[in-house]
Image: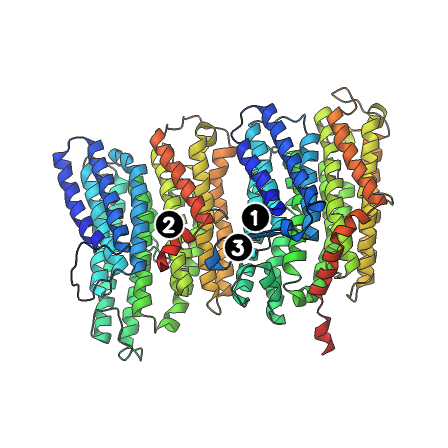
Amino acid sequence: MNALIISAVLGVVMMFSGILLKQKTAVRNVAIAGILLLLIVNILEMNGTTFFKIDTQGMILFDPFALLFNTVVFAAVLLYLLLSSDSMEKVGVYYAEYFALIFFILCGVTLVTSFKSLLILFLGIEIISIPLYILTGSDKRNLKSNEASLKYFLLGTFSTGLMLMGIALLYGARGTFSTVVNPMVTATPNILLLGGLSLLLFSMAFKVSAAPFHFWTPDVYDGAPTVFTSFMATIVKVVAFAGFVRLFDDAFEAQQPQWRIWVAVITAVTLFIGNITAVFQQSVKRMLAYSSIAQAGFMLFALYAMNADGKEGLLIYTAAYCAATIGIFAVLARMTDYTFDGFNGLAKAEPLVAGALTVFLLSLAGIPLTAGFMAKFYMLKAALATPGSSWLVVFAVLMAVVSVYYYFRVIQAMYFKSPAETAHPSFPAFFKWVLGILAALVILLGLFPELLLGRLYF
Amino acid sequence: MIAFFLIIVPLAAGLLSFFMKEEKAVKRFAFLASLASLAVSVLGLTTLNTDSYLTFSAPWMSSLGSSFSLKLDGMGQVLCLLTAVAYPLVLGGSWQASYKKPNQFFGLMLLAQAGLMGVFLASDALLFYFFWELALVPMYFLASQWGGERRISVTFKFFVYTFLGSVLMLIGILYIHSQTADHSFSLASFYKVQIPGRTQLWVFWLFFAAFAVKMPVFPFHTWQPETYEQAPTATTMILSGVMVKMGLLGLIRWLMPVLPIASYQWGDTVMIMAVIGIIYASLIAIRQDDLKRLIAYSSIAHLGLMCAAVFSENTSAAQGVMIQLFNHGVNIIGLWIIVEIIERRYGTRKISELGGLAQQAPVMATFFVIIALANIALPLTNGFAGEFLMFNGLLQAQSKFYLLFTVLAGLGIILAAVYTLNMIRKTFYGEAVSLKAPVTDLKLNEKLVLGVIVVIILWLGIHPQSLLGVTDSFAKDWVNKIDISYLFRK
């Protein structure tokens, strides 16, 4: 509850800071202080200190999973702002507004991770989506950015429509918006319930960009300003996953036999399309867009398995994926050349940046000693506990091998190719420090995942 | 504690190397660190050879049922000793070679050593998997950064092959973990699991894929000759001398005792693959003009023989494999050192461009002949004892086709003699070919390193008991673990 209210207030604060503060550094510092505050109050709530007591009629419940998930997300946003907030200056003139929109999104995030009612889920998803449409189109002079924004808006509202319809059908079937299901009512699956279930499945699959609902992703990620692509591809995506898993865990547990096979198919198709298409990309930014689809395939295992391992897996996947992807995007946003060749010889010019990038890429590829390995490990372990899923697991690791191809292309460019003619941009010392710390975190989490997961059961 | 130090010494030294600037200093430091590992390993074999020193355990990821536990058993002793012996030999033998960014080169070499030691010591499946990959990553960087012209694509192929094998193994590990009674990754729990025969049949391949790629066994070998050719020679020595042993260790420790029924059932299939590999690799080796490729193919043949021997599932073969793990490593490193000397001095490693080196470099020729003869297992050399035991084991194998396998594997020995003797004849004897550089004999460090190798070869050839004693109880124990004859008695 702390984070929900304070994030909304901070959004308003940021809007006014644009008027009151003349200097961009000041605005930035206010934003970083804000997210730090958000992180602290959320951790306080994990330890039992709640500032606000509001009766939500059971529509919102901040359980340990929701709180821990929010902590991970806020920490990711903190690192994101530390690394990339100065890259936002390049995007447009309304600097403070971007931060305001980000805080409003965080308000939506707290709703999506803690809802117990379909209405709150809808509200949260919309609070996240609308600022995102704006951020995607924030580079107003750039046609690609405008196009991406329009595309995202049209398809996004379409999927929202599906979601509303699904919620309506569910209301018809159960007579309540609550996801806490009375087992008496739901004993027999009827057409209303199954119709609502599939509509919700499709619309959520759209939000997490799972195939075959992924077509918007590469274009939107490519067209949006790189700093905001980073935000969309990491924080927004994992939060949509948290909502997805929470919805199906609460509301549709009894129907699991009916939807599991569909989730399995979506997972397989997502892994296949994401990985195979990423292989053919020439731009690192587009490669990361497809890689985010591929990683979504692995995260879908949490939904497929729907057990304790899967939830732990989702948590550590969130941390691992966000850390690595935010790090890579932060470097990418400073590069002038977005192709693979643009990274040629980076190791010679910037050994620390290249080293950190290598850690992030190895983590995304799932090499041991990095958080990415533990994330994939938990997901595979969760899936194997479900009988009859060996084919899916084997398929997933084969796709993980494919992913090595495109992640290693960046490593090969940085280390083994001679430098390009155009000079690499220079990176500020502070940026390098944060990047180094982020890489250290990735390795620490890969060695001791219990540092994070242990908080789930204290 | 010995087990722990075997990993931590190279690990710490490797990390420290990255911070050193001067080439000479880092080279000396790496050499001293490798000597320190050797000292630890020898201590573990001699004075501190008690259980309390040879095992180490610390809590790690306890919620998953995994722990940081290491154990130095008979096979571990042999392989750790090999790793510890190999590094001073490799670093000393290539002392003259100079590298760009030497701190990174030696740092990665030592990190790879830590990974290898970890693989040989781990008695927890998850830890084993960690080290399995950790040994691979530094090797990838070493080969792609300091290798030959086509290094990037070739070493990437190597990485993808091994990574594919290892992720399949990860599924296998997870599957067996889910079947253990106490949901643990420890080796002891893995040995206790009783998996139905039908399931074993497919889980077997998940593990075998990883080990077959690593050894490599035909038809999973295609990465190997190119990688050996393109990698810098010091890296190739570690790859071929030590790293391929990871595959055999995996078979012996992690596959066959855990899935004994499948190992028995698939035994013939694997032995057919191994025997085809022996003949095929030997025939190709005969046709090679490049010394590096020749040795690479000969290594496939030798590993094929060891793989076949493992699947004959008896004590004699097991003992043969145990000492051959060590012998093959030492011999092949010796061969690589000489090839490296030839390439560095004369600018070529093509057999057709070399000839008559023995006249100008008699000492080198003597060393080379002894090592090459050990490679084809002449009596009085170390290779003989190992191969004799392995063939003895093959003849006692339970397979219906044991005679055929033995004869075909024996054919491999004859072919090995053909290509090895041919190589000696063409490079060291015959007419001297005019070469770019003046032919000089060996330097002191090279003499010392090759001298040590020859002493090992002769000592183990005359007194193989000194190594057999180390693995004796391990081999007997192992044969009991994979014994499934009780199933037939019912």
The residue most toward the top is B438
Structural distance between the alpha carbons of marks 3 and 1: 13 Å
Q: Classify 10 Å Cα crowding around label 2: few (below 14), some (14-19), many (20 and above).
A: many
- Please give left or right for residue B91 compared with residue A333 in the image: right
Instruction: Please state which amino acid type lies under the numbered disc 3.
Output: Ser
Label disc, if present, on residue B67 of the rendered structure: 3
* Same chain assignment for discs 3 and 1: yes
Residue B14 coordinates in the image, percent (x, y): 56, 36
- Give the labeled residue for mark 2: A319
Structural distance between the alpha carbons of marks 2 and 3: 23 Å
Q: Secondary structure at mark 3?
A: strand
- Please give left or right for residue A379 compared with residue A178 in the image: right
> Do we see residue B15 in this rendering?
yes
**Residues at marks 3 and 1 touching, judged by CB atoms closer than 8 Å:** no
Quadrant hosting residue B35:
top right
Residue B194 coordinates in the image, percent (x, y): 61, 69
- Give the labeled residue for mark 1: B131
**Residues at marks 2 and 3 touching, judged by CB atoms closer than 8 Å:** no
* Same chain assignment for discs 1 and 2: no
Q: Chain of mark 2?
A: A
Vertical arrangement, residue B282 with respect to residue B147, above or below: below
